[in-house]
Amino acid sequence: MTAVHIPGVPVIEAGRLVSTSPATGVEAGRLPVATDEDVRQAVDRARTAGEWWAALGFTGRRTRMLQWRALLAKRIEQLAELVHVEGGKPVADAIVEIVTAIEHIDWAARNAGRVLGPRRVRSRLILAEFSGHLEYQPHGVVGVIGPWNYPVFTPIGSAAYALAAGNGVVLKPSEYTPVVGQWLVDSFAEVVPEQPVFTAVHGLGDVGAALCRSGVDKLAFTGSTATARKVMAACAETLTPVLIEGGGKDAMIVDSDADLDAAAEACVWGGMTNAGQTCIGIERVYAVDAVFDAFVDKVVARAGQLTVGAEGTDIGPITMPKQIDVIRRHIDAAITSGGRAVLGGPSAVQPPYVHPTVLVDVPEESAAVREETFGPTLTISRVRDADEAVARANALSYGLGGSVFGRRRAVAIARRLRSGMASVNSTLTFAGMSTLPFGGVGDSGFGRIHGEDGLREFGRAKAITRRRARSLLPSMTFERTPTDVARLVKAIKVMYGR
Ligand code: NDP
């Protein structure tokens, strides 16, 4: 019997995961569903392949990864079209996503040796007769579980850094975007044909759960906070270390000295790009009283011009059909609790699309302010001053990114946001800066991808001491004498006793 196809809802047919466009229902591709045993075997193969890959050294891996980066750059239109068909996002958004991923591959490849490679560290007066050596060795196999909303950028944010660090990688893409995931591993295999260093396993959530229990040496998860809890619980059984990139409810603060046109432009993009389905998307805005009305007018004017539809528009369909219920519930909750829609509103929900919606006067207790909406919706709240804005922005358990518009106090405000990242006078830009770490606090997760911290996340520190000379003040030996200990006491008082 053939399964019924609802556009965008993945189905399993004859052991294959069938992926379709949420806009048109056109099939994007079908891939074999992995059993638990398949997952284990993929991890075993990645372990052997990873050893071979690690043995290439930083220079050998850099060469291959730069070839991979070049392949992605040459085929950017092809990949963007696939991302568009499978997930529904406009081609231009897909291009921007892939550009960012390419930048991360390039940086990780070029900098892994410098950040992770063996180096001397300074010793201090205590143990001055020893030299210190530090390097970051690969974990072995890293399991990467990715979401559907940025099917290139998010897996690569972990995988490129893990690969550059010398690990084998097994990817479990979201069931909504398996074909893009397979495209990524196939393109890598073109430049690394010798061994299955980077492979994918496909299926529903249970395949992700199997990957957590498959013996991977580290698990990098990007997805919702609810699933993150399950992933961490599964990994706890074997003490497998995890990196969690969870959900968010990012706030933007508009201070009294902000450039309101720039703020409105960035707010609309930060909140509505990819139809608002962005972990670091702006979902809440706190604008100070003095500029509130003018700012809201400018946001509504810009957001009202965005086009919605399947092809050539600013906003595509909602990728995951069941998310539409969440968006509808949040808009309804905002209105019934006393909020007003100054653009869009309940009628903006026209599956598979949601038109831009701007809500004001929404109480802070509303689900529209507290929970991740993942749609092209914004709540804009009036606050007395920047202090109140910071207090409200920090009131949720999420803490991923954030944005501040202003002049004099903007950086100080950004530093006070309880989040892993913030952009001043822009939105989302920290995601594209490969030299900066990316990650959250609280319910948004822990650990970092990108930048030097992102590389270190995928290597374990190996510390080595090496004797250079005889110890003048022997302490870590049974050969020490009472005089040695007395001298040690004297030395420590001179050095640290003041
Ligand atoms: P989900 O949490 O539903 O799924 C994420 C991944 O986990 C998918 O591959 C999913 O597989 C898999 N999975 C599901 N159940 C399990 C399980 N029990 N064990 C292991 N893996 C499992 O998130 P979405 O895919 O819906 O992505 C959207 C979420 O991701 C949002 O909350 C968003 O904020 C967050 N996100 C965070 C980012 C960050 O960097 N912090 C970046 C991008 C998104 P399947 O799809 O087959 O169910």
Image (cartoon, rainbow, N blue to C red):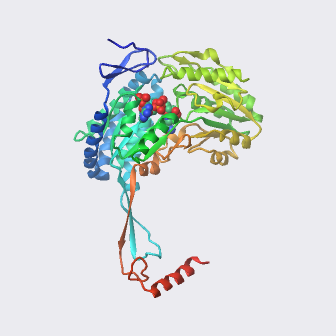
Asked whether the viewer can see residue 98, the reply is no
Quarter containing the C terminus: bottom right
Is 197 positioned to the left or the right of 454 in the image? Answer: left
Q: Height in image: 178 above or below 477?
A: above
Q: Residue 305, image x and y in percent?
A: 61, 20
Q: Height in image: 55 above or below 490?
A: above
Q: Height in image: 310 above or below 389?
A: above
Choose between 424 and 203: the one closer to the eye. Answer: 203
Q: Picture quarter containing residue 248?
A: top right
Q: Residue 245, image x and y in percent?
A: 49, 40
Q: How many marks?
A: 0
Farthest-out residue, left? 194
Is 421 positioned to the left or the right of 365 in the image? Answer: left
Choose between 417 and 191: the one closer to the eye. Answer: 417
Q: Residue 70, image x and y in percent?
A: 34, 38
Quarter containing the N terminus: top left
Q: Residue at x 57, y 23 (%)?
A: 326
Choose between 426 and 57: the one closer to the eye. Answer: 57
Q: Picture quarter containing residue 480?
A: bottom left
Q: Residue at x 68, y 33 (%)?
A: 260
Q: Residue 486, image x and y in percent?
A: 50, 85
